[in-house]
Image (cartoon, rainbow, N blue to C red):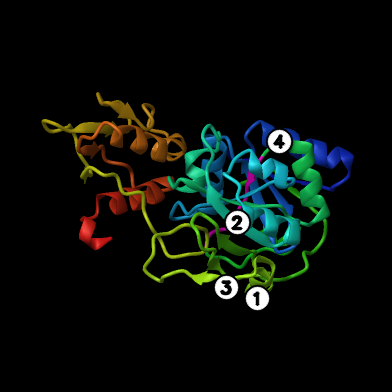
């Protein structure tokens, strides 16, 4: 949704309440963390999360980090384990993101995880971020608040220079302590894995855990933000730019077409982006080859087509 001008709010009680109300209705609000300003949206709303990608002109659907008020809030969405407990006690709030398996019934929009069955969670230390999370009372998906490919913003002025008129508000609490992005650790298997180096030294994490961090293989599938691209690969073959389904196929439609599931009957790319991963999962469960209607290759359509091309790639090419 476009805004004629982005509102600047200060992180007092009134400003935090206004920001939380905007987020609750599906709008985007930029807010400071201890690393950079993040672009927040309700992580439970596919439509709101799709607005992040639209506002940033983000060309691909990478997984997003979900920011939470505390470890108890994180436990509502991911399957906790002993390593997560140790690291949360040692380093939260702070610049540590943990990737954990999603809990059943988690309610997080599939666009946040880019169709993966894991979630990146973090409890930020910045007082304004913590105040906003408490006021909102829910999970906020938040990449950096800048147009894709631009320098990360460390002030509200940076946010406005890139996104004015494209987001509802920015919560201005002055410059961030300029630093590295959060360190991301994968805790989905027996061994902890360093998925992205960042503002918390790996040596400190290893000392807390009492064991070394495994290194992510360069060719491994994407499991967190800041890595090489990956893709949601259905078990069945995917055929793109299909006008109709062939015998034995199910059709994932776009626009006014007769199909098995439709990304957006009205041809709305934002609606289609929000529905993409959930619809692919739903059709994949039927076990038949998937045909996909043509998607316009502009705006969010570029990101949708990028994901679809990866899903359709020959399995040996992944």
Q: Position of residue 98 (x, y in %)?
A: 60, 56
Which residue of the protein is positioned furthest toward the bottom in this rendering? 203
Who is closer to the viewer here, 289 or 158?
A: 289
- Residue at horizontal 76 percent and vertical 50 percent from the top: 129
Residue 212's tag is 3
The stretch of residues the image draws in magenta is 139-148
N-terminal label among 4 and 1: 4
Residue 22's tag is 4
Q: Position of residue 36 (x, y in %)?
A: 69, 62
Judged by its main secondary structure, the magenta piece is loop
- What residue did someone put label 2 on? 98
Who is closer to the viewer here, 94 or 300?
A: 94
Crowd class of label 3 (few under 14; some 14 to 19; many from 20; radius 10 Å): some
Crowd class of label 4 (few under 14; some 14 to 19; many from 20; radius 10 Å): some
Q: Quadrant of residue 238?
A: top left
Q: Is residue 312 above or below residue 14?
A: below
Q: Secondary structure at mark 1?
A: helix
Along the horizontal axis of the image, is 9 left or right of 26?
right
| Quarter in which the N terminus is drawn | top right
Q: Position of residue 2 (x, y in %)?
A: 59, 40
Residue 203's tag is 1
Along the horizontal axis of the image, is 275 left or right of 246?
right
């Amino acid at each position: 949704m476009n805004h004629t001008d982005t509102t600047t709010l200060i992180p007092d009680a009134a400003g935090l309440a206004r920001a939380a109300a905007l987020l609750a209705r599906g709008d985007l609000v930029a807010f400071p963390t201890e690393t950079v300003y993040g672009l927040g949206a309700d992580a439970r709303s596919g439509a709101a999360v799709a607005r992040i990608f639209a506002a940033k002109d983000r060309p691909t659907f990478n997984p997003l980090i979900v920011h939470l008020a505390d470890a108890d809030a994180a436990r509502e969405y991911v399957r906790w384990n002993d390593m997560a407990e140790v690291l949360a006690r040692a380093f939260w709030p702070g610049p540590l993101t943990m990737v954990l398996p999603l809990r059943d019934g988690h309610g997080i929009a599939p666009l946040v995880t880019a169709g993966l069955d894991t979630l990146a969670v973090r409890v930020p230390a910045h007082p304004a971020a913590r105040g906003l999370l408490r006021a909102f009372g829910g999970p906020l998906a938040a990449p950096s608040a800048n147009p894709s490919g631009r320098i990360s913003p460390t002030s509200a002025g940076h946010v406005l220079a890139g996104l004015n008129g494209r987001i509802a508000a920015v919560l201005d609490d002055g410059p961030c302590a300029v630093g590295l992005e959060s360190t991301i650790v994968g805790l989905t298997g027996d061994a902890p894995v360093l998925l992205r180096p960042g503002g918390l030294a790996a040596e400190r994490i290893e000392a807390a855990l009492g064991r070394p961090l495994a290194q992510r293989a360069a060719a491994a599938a994407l499991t967190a933000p800041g890595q090489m691209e990956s893709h949601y690969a259905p078990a069945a073959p995917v055929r793109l730019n299909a006008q109709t389904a062939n015998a034995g196929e199910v059709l994932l439609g776009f626009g006014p077409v007769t199909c098995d599931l439709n990304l957006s009957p009205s041809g709305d790319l934002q609606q289609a982006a929000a529905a993409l991963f959930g619809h692919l999962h739903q059709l994949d469960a039927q076990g038949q080859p998937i045909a996909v209607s043509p998607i316009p290759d502009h705006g969010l359509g570029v990101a949708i087509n990028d994901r679809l091309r990866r899903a359709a790639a020959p399995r040996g090419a992944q």
